Amino acid sequence: MKVAMLGAGNVATHLSKALIRSGNPVVQVWSRSEENAVDLALKIGANSITDFATIADDVDLVIIAVSDDAIAPISSLIPQKNNRIIAHTSGSTDISVLSRHPKTAVLYPLQTFSKNVELDFKNVPLCIEGADVETENLILKLAEKLSNKVERVSSSDRMLLHISAVFACNFTNYFYTVSQELLEESSLSFDLIKPLIFETVNKIADNLPQDVQTGPAKRNDEQTLAKHLKILENKPALQELYRLISQNIVKKYVEAESSAK
């Protein structure tokens, strides 16, 4: 397939490189920032474009890899073409936003991307969906060239996956930032806590997260919880977050265990 990539951010960059490696050339790149489009186009040997009307006639697949709010407006500006697939890469956007086009699909890579951090795209789960059987099968064949982990996932299930990913990745990374800032306030290095983070992640490689939960809330250690809340008195937002999460952990493990007896 010949591909036009609309977007030049993290997802567009990694996906473009994976497509090229799989033998599916990205021949055109568009971005709201012409400079970003030129930059990515130069990196992958494509042409940059500034107008959707100039998408080449021989492009088989147009991928919209932009922020969720921009998908529908951009889709509405892409010229309709009967034998061309229009796809987006969003985890939280229904395939129906592309419905003005004859052939539509979703190619959602379930991973966190940074432009300058390389990863093996073969290990990135790809969730695919097509508006019709023929289109879905075409996207499936393409996805299987990109990744060893491909799943057909409906729009509703993909939204659930996206929410789960936010909890597992985005929220967790924010908590890493909170930990870093708390440590730095006392001139302690974040490196001290990294072995704990790595061990926690390693545990869930072979166990369910709920089976390896630890900590004062899991034990319902009220004295420790109170001490922690006291330390956070000058940070009311974090204090409330700590209280809310701790209460949920206590409810899940301590109260549930008591009621089961």
Image: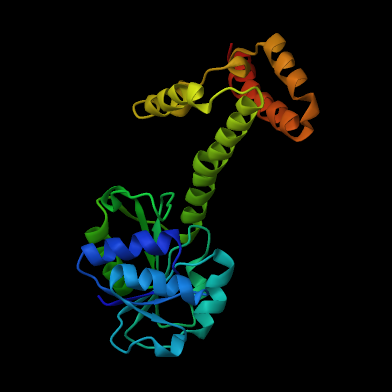
**Placement of 245 over or under 65, stated as above or below:** above
Residue 176 vs 255, above or below: the answer is below
**Residue 15 falls in image quadrant:** bottom left
**In the rendered image of this protein, does residue 224 appear above or below residue 33?**
above
For image coordinates 46% across by 28% down, the residue present is: 209
- Report the residue at 45% width, 85% height from top: 52
Q: Is residue 136 visible?
A: no
Of all residues, the one furthest to the left in this rendering is 23
Q: Quadrant of the N terminus?
A: bottom left
Which of 233 and 134 lies nearest the eye of the viewer? 233
Relative image position of residue 108 (x, y in whole percent): 41, 59
| Quadrant holding the C terminus | top right
Residue 76 seen from this side: yes
Q: How is the image coloured?
A: rainbow
Q: Residue at x 52, y 75 (%)?
A: 32
Name the foreground residue: 78 vs 134: 78
Q: How many marks?
A: 0
Asked whether 259 or 16 is in front, the reply is 16
Provide residue 6's location: percent of width, then percent of height. Answer: 43, 74
Q: Which residue corresponds to the image point at 50% horizontal and 51% vertical from the top-left?
A: 162
Question: In the visual, does 35 lie left or right of 174?
Answer: left
Position of 58 relative to 222 (above/below): below
Percent x, y for residue 170? 54, 44
Residue 187's spot in the image, x, y percent?
Answer: 61, 23
Name the quadrant containing residue 21: bottom left
